[in-house]
Image (spheres, rainbow, N blue to C red):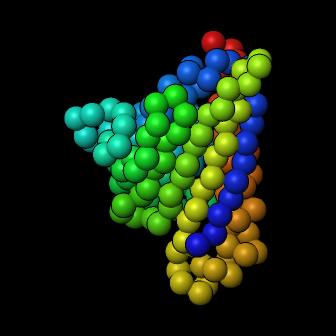
Amino acid sequence: MARVDNSIDILAPGEKVFAYIADLSARPQWVKWAKSVEVTSREKEGVGTTDRMVIQVVLRKEHVEGVVTEYTPGRLVAHRLTKGFDLTERLSVADLANGAKVDWAVEYTPPLGLLGKVVDFLFMATLMDQLMKDSLVDLKEELESR
């Protein structure tokens, strides 16, 4: 499994930052690979919340499903895809004197077996890292402009 980690400081209160990143339906507004999201469970936050999402990394769109696997209000949300792509992400928020720090870790298994591992080594890991960095910049701009 490949892993990519990134973080960013945001000049906004931690509770505001967490509320936004924990809202699965807001993902297309800041996560570069999330094209659409539909929360499919009755509960809209917390462990067990489920969703359907269309993601796109490179040229191919994938229809995936996921579930929130960890949730600590105001601090941590973890989300695992259960259908379509093997990916788990953890987003945590820590208060700073003048805002909040977001740490984001994504673990994924490249598709296509051995060929996927080679493509990941040559290209995919770098692409995922850049998509995460761009997503965090969008998150920062969105939250600091509110």
Q: Hey, which quadrant is residue 49 in on the image?
A: top left
Q: Residue at x 45, y 65 (%)?
A: 85
Q: How many marks?
A: 0
Q: Residue at x 36, y 61 (%)?
A: 82
Q: Quadrant of the C terminus?
A: top right
Q: On the picture, is 98 further left or further right than 3? A: right
Which of the 4 image quarters holds residue 115?
Answer: bottom right
Q: Is residue 109 above or below residue 141?
A: below
Q: Specify the quadrant of the image occupied by residue 114.
A: bottom right
Measuring from the top left, give residue 102's x and y in whole percent. Answer: 67, 36
Q: Is residue 1 left or right of residue 103?
A: left
Q: x, y (%) of residue 4?
A: 68, 59
Question: Which part of the image, by quadrant, shows the N terminus?
Answer: bottom right
Horizontal and vertical percent for residue 125? 70, 65
Check the image and name the residue furthest to the top: 146
Q: Position of residue 16 (x, y in %)?
A: 57, 20
Instruction: Indicate whether 91 appears above or below 57.
Output: above
Foreground residue among 78 and 60: 78
Q: Is residue 134 left or right of residue 61?
A: right
Q: Residue furthest left?
A: 42
Q: Which residue is drawn at the image coordinates 31% and 45% (left, top)?
A: 48
Q: Nearer the viewer, residue 115 or 9?
A: 9
Query: Does residue 134 appear anywhere in the picture?
Result: no
Find the residue positioned furthest to the bottom.
114
